[in-house]
Image (tube, helix red, strand yellow):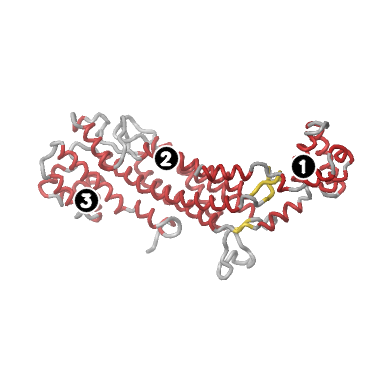
Amino acid sequence: MDPVSVLDYRYGTEQMRTVFRANSYLKYLLEVEATLAEVQESKKIIPKGSAESIRNGVKLVKRERVEEIESEINHDVMAVVKALEEQSGDSGKWIHFGATSYDIVDTGRALQHKAAIELLEKAINSLIKSMAKLAKSHKKTVMLGRTHGQWATPITFGLKIAVFLAELCRHRERLEEIKPRILTGKFLGAVGSGAAMAPNTIDVQSAICKKLGLNEPLATTQILGRDRIAEVIAWGSNLATSLEKFTLEVRNLQRSDINEVAEAFNKEKQVGSSTMAQKKNPITSENIGGLSRIVRSMLYTSYENNLQWHERDLANSSSERIILPQFYILLEYIIIKSDDVFSNLYVNKEKMAENISNAGGLPMAEAFVIALGKTDLGRQEAHELVRQISMEAETNKITFNEAISNNSVVKEYLDGKTIAKTLQPENYIGHSEEIINNVLDAL
């Protein structure tokens, strides 16, 4: 093999590639043609026995022959029809009766979407399971919360993952909402009026879609509205952004100066750098980030494809042949790679505790604002007092712990036991465990 595209060997799974291989696409088109004949025969539109001959002919059609015919007539769907006709005997003349090309293409694509989405769902469910396990394991693992890149207040690592998990579950819910719209076939003919098979067209369309496990549209032109494809690619782009966000957090927390989590690394053989031999880089997370950007880039094309002249033109066809395989192959791949990251993540609890300790108590500033705000001092005065103490600690090069513990105003309102308790990060994680449990219970 001497591939042109990295999708052939570097990125993607064989199971998703198979859905979009040329032979698979032909199989979907032939399945639609055979199903059309079966439904038409059942409604006495074509002669009895024709559908069986056409169905048997499907097994004999070769892609090479289809491509040979297409090279002569310059029409892909008619090449499929003619190749099938050659293998269907006298019944071949009834193939594609009353249909237009995009009755076959869009319905075949719907079957392709169906197979691809089943693989996406499997991958998403596996990632949800891995993240749920991680959140559950670290319900009580206290770490620094960070906002604007600065120390904020303590959280637990389990809460961080639970937030990601809840977001991932929303993506799963959205997919369920859009599936009826993307898993839709159509058989309303050349301009959407259904004239070619009237007065049976609506019944034929309904029967075909039911037999193929698809939904039927209310109205179409010659093609299904491309808002449907734009919607699924927008959904996937949204998911890809979340996955990049989740793994971007891994990349940040794996920085040498933070070192709180790390991707799995094979110390026996894995190489981090061709020159810096000590390196252990978060390459999978970085890979996910790069590929997520490619997924999002397809969104623009999918919106452009919804622009059509009158009842249709051909401007969408070429780009969809490119973006649909790329979209599904890359999206499944980054979901699976995200699962790999989080199911094998090293969580350095000791470093999390050390980083909190090295913060010298500053992450507990809000806790003191609240504790002092409950006294006669009041919230506003408490906030200004704690702000001044934190600034003075920096100026005097002492820790916030020392400054707050020795401040005479603070000691006037809080006793030593309360001050000591308020300085403990584990005492200021709020409802973290309850929130984690709520997320896990909602799965």
Q: Are marks 1 and 2 in contact (CB under 8 Å)?
A: no
Residue 434 picture location, percent across and down: 61, 43
What element does badge 1 sit on? helix
First in residue order: circle 3 vs circle 1 = 3
Residue 221: image quadrant is top left
Residue 302 visible in rendering? no
Residue located at (23% from left, 52% from top): 66
Tell me: 135 left or right of 205. Answer: right
Residue 258 picture location, percent across and down: 68, 55
Residue located at (64% from left, 66% from top): 278
Q: Amino acid at mark 1?
A: Ala
Q: Are marks 2 and 3 in contact (CB under 8 Å)?
A: no
Residue occupied by mark 2: 176
Q: Which mark is residue 69?
A: 3
| Residue density around tag 1, few if under 14, some if 14–19, many if 20 or more, within 10 Å | many
Q: Amino acid at mark 3?
A: Ile
Tell me: 371 left or right of 138. Answer: right
What element does badge 2 sit on? helix
Give the number of the mark in front: 2 or 3: 2
First in residue order: circle 2 vs circle 3 = 3
Residue occupied by mark 1: 365
